[in-house]
């Protein structure tokens, strides 16, 4: 085979297209492997400094090999603020409208918690000022106890800093992220610092502090610290955050949040100033503050194995029996001894010396041993009366019902589920029911389909309570459903606190609460249907009584008006509208016996049959004049028939035949 001939046509740098009319042989290809000049190949290929090897890259060049040493050099600690700077959607700041709502929500939650802990009836001012088309200034002011000056920068400009994470008692805030995350979002979108004004008591100075977050270290930076000579509040806190947002109405807007907040918190007074200048004032619906929740220890039922191991390892120097009765609520020394006996673990052993198998046996025995329900002092439900008062505050409805369940436990955390219903009135009858979700008195407005509360409403058979419900949907009725979950630790699905996780224990309690309210509503609706039916019957009787009076008057020779009067006087005994209303009230109050007596369900006899009506009195008087009154026939006593004795007659002897 002949040698390869290359024809080079002109081009930049002496390079051009090559024409290869013939192929090289294998020997010539191996012999012709030489390094090409740098100007012909575009520069020398990069080599790995650590290994000296050359690799082939995607563009014809060389790529470096990463070693364990180079990877180790790139590892460094991530600040919490840095993490949430890149993942702010986890905290509820994924769009401008939601960011505005989350900022208002976090500030109001902190104000309510502070006022209730200080036993102060909350008075909150929420103001949203529009700076330009996309920028807003959120101002939330309360009459709480105020904040100590040294703690202001840490509370508002440091993530994961708070006093509510390590204690088991009901509160709105849990993680120490909310308000500082709102300030971080405002800092990222506008570059403006948070402005906090606070005073701790009358006669003390008020401080105005501007702070920002150092995201690399998760520490506060104080930009200004001034002492305010005059501030109209004797004690309280004012927070100002400027951020990029969007103000809109609807179910997920700030307006709906304020309305739902006053429903779940009848004791709060809110003044809400909208960006357009409109002002809405919600006065106190109740002057009584909620009971202060008590801090408790975890309940043994539902506690996980890893949590049990950590709790016993922390109980240094204690015996197993003493540790169990110390770290758990409702576990007495006798109950702890019973648990140790069931697990086969000596109660006199040190808690820190237990093996993994003994820990697992102890965990199983704790779940199987009967322990008292957790104390309800750590959870403060709204209450049935206040739930209905809150629903009346918002809805112009016909019926209101409420139910509060007994405390239950999930993962060792006590919780209470409450339910309320508003039916009829001005609620739309041709639309699906409205769901109001609350967790520790805080409205949940986003992610309804991912929430256990919504799932519980969908799973309820509303047809059993005389309501229309398409398959797999909400009931179509003039109905509003209120559900509140109160717990020492609400299991939210994310840090944004928008939906409740679907634990089996929580789903069961939601189901029972909805069924309880559904039964109460159904009894009222059925009573109303019976009353409407009786009213229609009464209308028919009243329509034909005048004609009947004229006919009977012509037959008997009496005045038609007097006959009509007798029939109208007897009408209430046959049309039982009042009795049905009394029976419904008795059933609602829980008096089943009285309800059965009024409606005649058990006896099957009508109460009106026992009473002497005017028609019966008139007929008796007429029959007495004619002498047609008959005496009851005397009873004839018959002697009991004697039983005949059954005796057989003696058989006759046959005569013998002769020869």
Image (tube, helix red, strand yellow):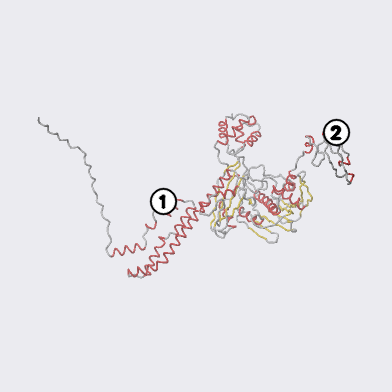
| Residue ranking furthest to the left | 659
What x and y, as percent, mark residue 256? 64, 56
Q: Which mark is residue 31?
A: 2
Q: Is residue 384 left or right of residue 584?
A: right
Whether residue 527 sits left or right of residue 155 in the image: it is left
Q: Quadrant of residue 139?
A: bottom right
Question: Could you tell me which residue is drawn at 53 percent across and 56 percent down?
Answer: 399
**What is the spatial separation of the Cα atoms under label 1 and label 2, in whole angstroms?**
112 Å
Rendered view: 354 above or below 244: above
What SS does tag 1 mark?
A: loop
Question: Would you call the spot at circle 1 few (<14 residues within 10 Å), some (14-19), or many (20 or more)?
Answer: few
Q: Secondary structure at mark 2?
A: helix
Which one is nearer the viewer's eye here, 166 or 87?
87
Residue 424 at least partly seen = yes
Residue placed most toward the observer, 17 or 170: 17
Would you identify the image quadrant in which residue 564 lies?
A: bottom left
Q: First in sequence: mark 1 or mark 2?
A: 2
Q: Residues within 10 Å of mark 2 (few under 14, many from 20)?
A: few
Left or right: where 122 falls relative to 157:
left
Kindly indicate the quadrant of the structure image that contains residue 651. Answer: top left
In percent of width and height, residue 561 lies at 38, 70
Report x, y in % for residue 77: 76, 40
Please give the residue where the numbered disc 1 appears in the rendered image. 602
Tell me if 158 is positioned left or right of 293 in this view: right
Q: Nearer the viewer, residue 12 or 467?
A: 12
């Amino acid at each position: 085979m002949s040698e390869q001939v290359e024809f080079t046509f002109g081009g930049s740098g002496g390079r051009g297209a090559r024409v290869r009319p013939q192929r090289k042989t294998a020997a010539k290809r191996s012999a012709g492997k030489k390094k090409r000049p740098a100007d012909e190949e575009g520069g020398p290929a990069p080599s790995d400094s650590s290994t000296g090897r050359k690799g082939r890259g995607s563009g014809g060049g060389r790529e470096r090999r990463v070693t364990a040493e180079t990877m180790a050099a790139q590892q460094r600690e991530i600040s919490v603020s840095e993490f949430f700077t890149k993942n702010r959607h986890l905290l509820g700041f994924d769009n401008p409208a939601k960011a505005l709502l989350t900022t208002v929500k976090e500030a109001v939650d902190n104000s309510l918690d502070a006022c209730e802990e200080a036993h102060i009836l909350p008075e909150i001012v929420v103001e949203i000022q529009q700076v330009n088309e996309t920028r807003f200034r959120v101002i939330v002011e309360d009459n709480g106890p105020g904040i100590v000056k040294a703690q202001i920068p840490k509370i508002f400009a440091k993530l994961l800093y708070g006093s509510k994470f390590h204690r088991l008692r009901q509160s709105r805030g849990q993680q120490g992220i909310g308000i500082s995350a709102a300030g971080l979002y405002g800092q990222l979108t506008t570059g403006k610092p948070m402005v906090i004004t606070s005073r701790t008591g009358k006669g003390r100075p008020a401080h105005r502090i501007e702070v920002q977050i150092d995201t690399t270290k998760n520490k506060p930076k104080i930009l200004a610290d001034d002492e305010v000579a005059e501030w109209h509040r004797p004690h309280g806190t004012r927070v100002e955050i400027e951020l990029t947002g969007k103000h809109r109405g609807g179910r997920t807007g700030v307006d709906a949040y304020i309305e739902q907040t006053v429903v779940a918190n009848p004791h709060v007074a809110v003044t809400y100033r909208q960006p357009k200048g409109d002002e809405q004032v919600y006065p106190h619906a109740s002057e009584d503050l909620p009971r202060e929740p008590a801090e408790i220890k975890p309940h043994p039922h539902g506690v996980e194995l890893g949590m049990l191991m950590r709790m016993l390892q922390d109980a240094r120097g204690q015996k197993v029996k003493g540790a169990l009765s110390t770290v758990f609520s409702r576990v007495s020394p006798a109950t702890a001894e019973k648990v140790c006996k069931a697990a086969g673990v000596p109660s006199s052993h040190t808690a820190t010396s237990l093996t993994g198998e003994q820990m697992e046996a102890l965990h199983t025995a704790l779940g199987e041993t009967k322990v008292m329900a957790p104390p309800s002092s750590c959870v403060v439900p709204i209450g049935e009366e206040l739930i209905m008062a809150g629903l009346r505050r918002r809805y112009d409805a016909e019926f209101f019902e409420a139910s509060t369940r007994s405390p239950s436990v999930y993962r060792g955390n006590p919780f209470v589920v409450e339910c309320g219903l508003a039916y009829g009135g001005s609620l739309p009858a041709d639309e699906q029911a409205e769901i109001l979700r609350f967790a520790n008195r805080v409205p949940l407005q986003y992610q309804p389909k991912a929430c256990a509360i919504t799932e519980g409403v969908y799973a309820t058979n509303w047809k059993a309570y005389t309501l229309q419900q398409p398959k797999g949907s909400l009931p179509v009725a003039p109905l509003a459903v209120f559900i509140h979950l109160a717990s020492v630790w609400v299991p939210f699905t994310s840090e944004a606190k928008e939906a409740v996780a679907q634990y089996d224990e929580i789903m069961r309690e939601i189901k029972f609460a909805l069924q309880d309210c559904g039964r109460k509503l159904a009894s009222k609706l059925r009573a109303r249907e019976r009353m409407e039916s009786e009213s229609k019957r009464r209308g028919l009787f009243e329509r034909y009584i005048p004609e009947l009076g004229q006919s009977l008057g012509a037959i008997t020779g009496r005045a038609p008006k007097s006959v009509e009067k007798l029939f109208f006087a007897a009408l209430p005994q046959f049309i039982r509208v009042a009795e049905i209303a009394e029976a419904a009230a008795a059933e609602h109050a829980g008096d089943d016996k009285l309800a059965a007596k009024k409606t005649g369900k058990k006896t099957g006899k009508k109460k009106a049959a026992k009473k002497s009506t005017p028609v019966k009195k008139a007929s008796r008087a007429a029959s007495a004049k004619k002498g047609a009154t008959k005496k009851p026939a005397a009873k004839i006593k018959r002697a009991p028939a004697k039983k005949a004795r059954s005796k057989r007659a003696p058989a006759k002897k046959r005569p013998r035949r002769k020869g």
